[in-house]
Amino acid sequence: MATAPIITWFVEHRLHYPTCIASRHVHLNENFQDWEQAIRSRWSEWNDFRLLLEFHVVLPQPPNMEAGIAAHVILIQAPRED
């Protein structure tokens, strides 16, 4: 089964200075119904399933996009309005 590698970043907005300095790779398969769970599971120790978690595909793509990477995705937990 073919997969598309993506790079994910997790940001917790309940922190005073939300940042993410380390990414995690996820390989998405052709079953798009599984993508959200595949991404969430890579951050399971940070992910609080009681809180809203937003997924944002980085567009435009980073100027020095890594070869073979389909996308960068930022996960924002407990997004703030400000």
Image (spheres, rainbow, N blue to C red):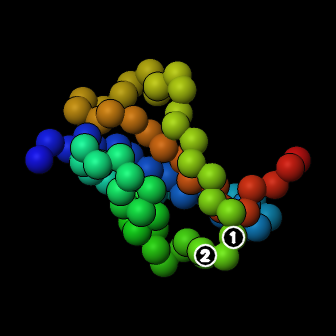
Residue 73 is left or right of residue 49, and the answer is left
Are circles 2 and 1 on residues that touch, CB within 8 Å?
yes
Circle 1 is placed at which residue position?
51
Residue 82 is left or right of residue 6, and the answer is right
Circle 2 is placed at which residue position?
48
Q: Amino acid at mark 2?
A: Asp
Residue 64 is left or right of residue 54, and the answer is left
Q: Residues within 10 Å of mark 2 (few under 14, many from 20)?
A: some
Pick the front one: 39 or 58: 39
Residue 53 is left or right of residue 41, and the answer is right
Query: Quick one: which residue is furthest to the left in this view?
Result: 1
Measured as percent of width and height from the top left, residue 75 is found at: 56, 53
Measured as percent of width and height from the top left, residue 41 is found at: 40, 68
Q: From where the camera sits, is residue 25 visible? A: no
Disc 1 is placed on an element classified as loop
State which quadrant residue 48 falls in: bottom right
Above or below residue 66? Residue 53 is below
